[in-house]
Amino acid sequence: MGFVDPLAAIIASLCFLGIMLYKRVNLGITLNATALLLALLSLDSKEVPTMIFETAADLLTISVVLATFGIMLLSQLYKDTGVINKLSESISKIIKNSKVVLGLLPAVIGFLPVAGGALMSAPLVDSEAEKLGLNPEKKAYVNLWFRHTIFPVYPLSQVLIITAALTETTVASIITRQIPVVIVMIIVGYIIGFRNLSKKKSVQKANTNDSLNSDLRDFFIAFSPILATIVVVVGLDLLGLTLPQKGFDVLVATFVGLAVLIMISKPSLAVFAKPFKTWGIYGITLAAYGAFLLRNTMVAAGISEIFKSLVANGSIDIILLLTAVPAVLGFLTGSPSGGVAIGVSILAGMLTFSAKTAALIYISTYLGYVIAPTHLCFIFTADYFKCSLGKVYRYIIPSFIISFATALLIYFMV
């Protein structure tokens, strides 16, 4: 075994993780470096190479890593081919109510799971928000909150995929439990974001049948790659095969979505090759592997045994571990992937994961991340609209509390 006891090793590793995140080191490098440091501190040096190889050779790890790469490629091509712009433009043309458009546009851009992606939707939100007379803080809140309503039920969310893989549950089973939370998030966002607005400022314009049919056609064409991936994921899960348990459902669905996107956009070779030349796509892919390596290292080091004994003697309630630990990790790290990887690793060995516990871990981490001051979308949005984080928190905190309470209610009721 290593020369440091498990508790000291995890504290040192988490401090190292915090420093790396504070320095804005790539998440892929950060998670892998943290896992290696923990392994060197808590395991025999001969076990470290074996740990790395076994993690890399695991079928679940391979499928999730490849799916993550495919998702990032899909996201980048959506942007580079201009299809995402056609999708958002068609929505603006179909729906003439500015409030509804303001809720939909950030969520649609949210289909691209890229760090700081809220900056992409900010100009669109700014333009529509002017029609309603929203102040800068409300603009920032609407852009940030509605962008993040989609991910708890989005099958191509890397964090959702990693959560399902690490807890050995399925993406579809977690999504089912998140639907009520997402509905509440949307309602809360609508009430807080648009309350006390004069109805006459909500611009609604008529549309002809011909233009509406054209806009609807443009929408369905632009949305078809995402729709194809969702249909394939759900379909494979409903078939009852073993594919979801090994992560192959999302892997297959991702490349189906890629094929559809290529067919409708017909990108040139230069456009198709562009994402392969950017570091971001590889960094996120490396982060997926790092999440598994960190989980396996923590299990091998016996980290969960420390918390297991505390739960057994009644010092810590298991619900507290399922909520507070992931939420705090998501908040402190500003990374839902990192928060989930560490949270699941701590809880592994203490309980048998189910869709119920996996969903609670996910939403706790995710909501903690959404309100984190280290969250890039939060920082970029506040900077774009020229307002302080503190003023945006007046709207974010109540939204967080209500959404979190809903998640707990679902956990206890269903």
Image (cartoon, grey):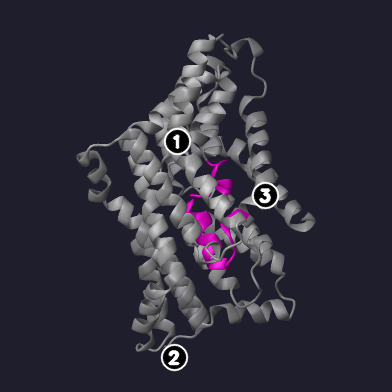
* Residue 163 visible: yes
Marker disc for residue 1: 2
User: Which residue is at 55% across, 55% downward?
Assistant: 236
Which amino acid type corresponds to the residue marked 1 in the rendered image?
Thr
* The one of 383 and 112 positioned closer to us in this rendering: 112
- Measured in 3D between alpha carbons, the distance from the residue under mark 1 to the one under mark 3, in whole angstroms, is 23 Å
91 left or right of 317?
A: left
Q: What residue is disc 1 on?
A: 381
User: Which residue is at 45% across, 86% downward?
Assistant: 4
x, y percent for residue 63? 43, 63
**Eyeballing the image, is 344 above or below 391?**
below
Q: Earlier in the sequence, mark 3 or mark 2?
A: 2
- Measured in 3D between alpha carbons, the distance from the residue under mark 3 to the one under mark 2, in whole angstroms, is 40 Å
User: Which residue is at 73% across, 57% downward?
Assistant: 411
Q: What residue is disc 3 on?
A: 404
Q: Quadrant of the C terminus?
A: bottom right
Q: Earlier in the sequence, mark 1 or mark 3?
A: 1
In the image, residue 30 lies in the stretch drawn in magenta: no
Instruction: Give the quadrant of residue 2.
Output: bottom left
The reply to whether callout 2 and callout 1 are in contact (CB within 8 Å) is: no
x, y percent for residue 223? 47, 34
Element on which disc 3 rests? helix
* The one of 277 and 215 positioned closer to us in this rendering: 215
Which residues fall within the magenta stretch? 148-172
Which amino acid type corresponds to the residue marked 2 in the rendered image?
Met
